């Protein structure tokens, strides 16, 4: 039986447009993957506050045949290596290779399954955690898993929202507490 005090807290991060520059098209290869300027200091600050850092990304370009699982793994390996060199540990990365034009998927955002899996695997308390994204579907995915969301502009400044992310979500931005009126 797990004590609730042993649960972790996490920042779930969308990838394209949050971590790396989104040019308005798919990021097909490592050569096209450019990390946004304030990402490393922002992740360092969040990690220092005790948050696990987990990527949650739709990669429907795989279903469309635009790039492969291998290309996605290469990008994620390189990013995690670069993070390590900055003292940042990316706890896990979840991606959904599906696209609605090519079949149904529960994992693809706005579905919450990737986040639910991450919470189960890493013993994360959703009520202490945040989802950061640049599209409404990112926030919907968080909410579906009971996680509050912060929407930033595409290619926005992650460092700017660190003060928000280092607070416990309250009744205003937390989907579950907001719906039943308690904080
Ligand atoms: Mg995005």
Image: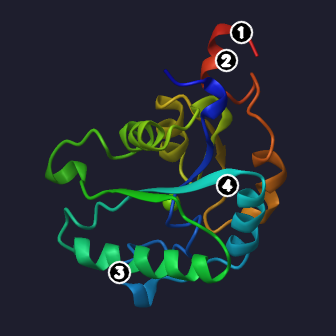
Which callout, 2 or 4, points at the residue further toward the start of the chain? 4
Residue receiving disc 2: 177
Residue receiving disc 4: 152
Secondary structure of the residue carrying numbered label 3:
helix
Viewer-nearest of discs 1 and 4: 1
Q: Nearer the viewer, residue 96 or 102?
A: 96
Classify mark 3: residues with Cα within 10 Å, few (<14), some (14-19) or many (20+): few
Q: Dots 2 and 4: beta carbons under 8 Å? A: no
Which corner quadrant of the image does residue 3 belong to?
top right
Q: CA distance from mark 4 to mark 3?
A: 26 Å
Q: Residue at x 51, y 46 (%)?
A: 138
Q: CA distance from mark 3 to mark 2?
A: 39 Å
The reply to whether residue 23 is in sight is no
Q: CA distance from mark 1 to mark 4?
A: 26 Å
Residue receiving disc 3: 74
Q: CA distance from mark 1 to mark 2?
A: 6 Å
In which quadrant of the rendered image does the C terminus lie?
Answer: top right
Residue receiving disc 1: 181
Q: Dots 3 and 2: beta carbons under 8 Å? A: no
């Amino acid at each position: 039986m797990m004590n609730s005090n042993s649960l972790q807290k996490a920042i779930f991060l969308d990838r394209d447009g949050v971590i790396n520059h989104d040019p308005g098209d798919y990021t097909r290869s490592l050569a096209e993957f450019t990390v946004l300027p304030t990402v490393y200091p922002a992740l360092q600050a969040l990690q220092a506050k005790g948050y696990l850092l987990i990527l949650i990304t739709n990669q429907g370009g795989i279903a469309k045949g635009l790039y492969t699982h291998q290309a996605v793994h290469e990008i994620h390996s390189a990013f995690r290596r670069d993070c390590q060199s900055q003292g940042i540990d990316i706890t896990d990365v979840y991606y959904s290779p599906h696209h609605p034009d090519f079949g149904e998927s529960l994992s693809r955002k706005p579905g919450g399954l990737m986040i639910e899996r991450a919470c189960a695997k890493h013993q994360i308390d959703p009520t202490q955690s945040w989802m950061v994204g640049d599209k409404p579907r990112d926030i919907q995915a968080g909410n579906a898993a009971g996680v509050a969301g912060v929407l930033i502009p595409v290619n926005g400044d992650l460092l700017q929202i660190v003060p928000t992310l280092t607070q416990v979500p309250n009744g205003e931005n937390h989907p579950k507490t907001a719906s039943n009126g308690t904080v």
